[in-house]
Amino acid sequence: MTAHIIDGKQLAATIREDVAQRVKALAADGLQPGLAVVLVGEDPASQVYVRNKAAACEKAGLASQVIRLDAGISQETLLATVDQLNNDPGVHGILVQLPLPAHMDSARVIEAISPAKDVDGFHISNAGLLMTGTPLVKPCTPYGIMKMLDAQGVSLWGAEAVIVGASNIVGKPMAMLMLAEGATVTLCNSKTRDLAAHTQRADVLVVATGRRGMIDGTMIKPGATVIDVGINRGDDGRLYGDVDFGSARTVAGAITPVPGGVGPMTIAMLLVNTVEAAERQRAS
């Protein structure tokens, strides 16, 4: 068996085209969706992420601004910046790029963002709505994964779904979205005993741990759909996932590559969330 490769780039391009059409429709009503990204410090990975997000906004016709702040600023200065963006009617989405410098409280900063403009879906209000099955904003990576599964015709109704990694960014919201679609969900973490016993049951396996090659082909159910969220840079400078792609693709029925899988979808869904925020503003 050789797994079908799930092309995140191609699906993301289709979603971005739809976003561009929705942006045009809003522009015809005199409203241009706007995303503000706040970058604190000079973290190299964050610089790349922010540059990619700004480029994607430009291609889709969204107004984009990147606010760059020195790593040594006070948390109060950052909170004041967020408050200014909350009150700017031309900004529909606010994203504070993580990680923040060690002297800042990330949770407090995220909770300072207006829930209506929280296009990452990290605000405690949006997390609560997701928990109760009535999400206002879905976190970008889990949202993108759900779109990928839908595009592949993968039904979650009654399926065994196993998520490895229990973060607030991917694992927990992923579990809520899958539960809402009728899956039986197992959420594993670093303390899970006999991890393979869980992953080998999975019809759909999502891996988001930040540990290169943590899952190999022996841990995968034959024919399973495998979603690899990991992005790890090797000593050779190449990017690798949390799944050992070489062994996994001989067992899985479908698998996402790294790069070119989940990553493009995360950015695409950020654009979707921003446009949806602008559409909500127009309707209010």
Image (cartoon, rainbow, N blue to C red):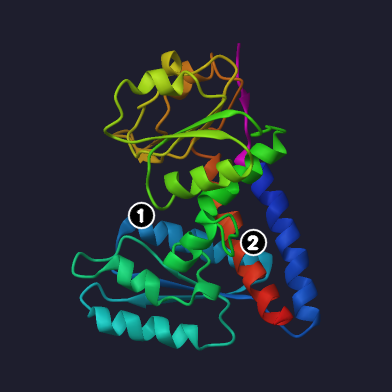
Callout 1: 10 Å neighbours few (<14), some, many (20+)?
few
From mark 2 to mark 1, how far is it between C-alphas?
Answer: 23 Å
Q: How many marks?
A: 2
Q: Callout 2: helix, strand or loop?
A: helix
Location of residue 33 (image quadrant):
bottom right
The residue under label 1 is 45
Q: Callout 1: helix, strand or loop?
A: helix
Q: Is residue 69 visible?
A: yes
Q: Where is residue 282? Give x, y as percent.
A: 71, 81
Q: Where is residue 137? Give x, y as percent.
A: 57, 63
In the rendered structure, does residue 3 fall within the stretch colored magenta? yes
Location of residue 277 (image quadrant):
bottom right
Question: Which of marks 1 and 2 precedes in the sequence?
Answer: 1
Q: Is residue 213 above or below residue 56?
A: above
Give the mark toward the camera: 2 or 1: 2
Where, quadrant-wise, is the C terminus in this rendering?
A: bottom right
Q: Is residue 227 above or below residue 109?
A: above
In-front residue for pair 44/207:
207
Q: Amino acid at mark 2?
A: Val
The residue under label 2 is 272
Using residue 242 as the reference point, say whether residue 11 is left or right of it. Answer: right
Location of residue 79 (image quadrant):
bottom left
Q: Where is residue 184? Give x, y as percent.
A: 55, 32
Write the residue at 74% across / 57% down. 17
Write the residue at 52% across / 24% down. 202
- The stretch of residues the image draws in magenta is 1-8
Using residue 182 as the reference point, say whether residue 37 is left or right of it. Answer: left
Where, quadrant-wise, is the N terminus in this rendering?
A: top right
Q: Amino acid at mark 1?
A: Ala
Q: Is residue 139 visible?
A: no
Mark 2 and 1 residues: CB-CB less than 8 Å, in contact?
no
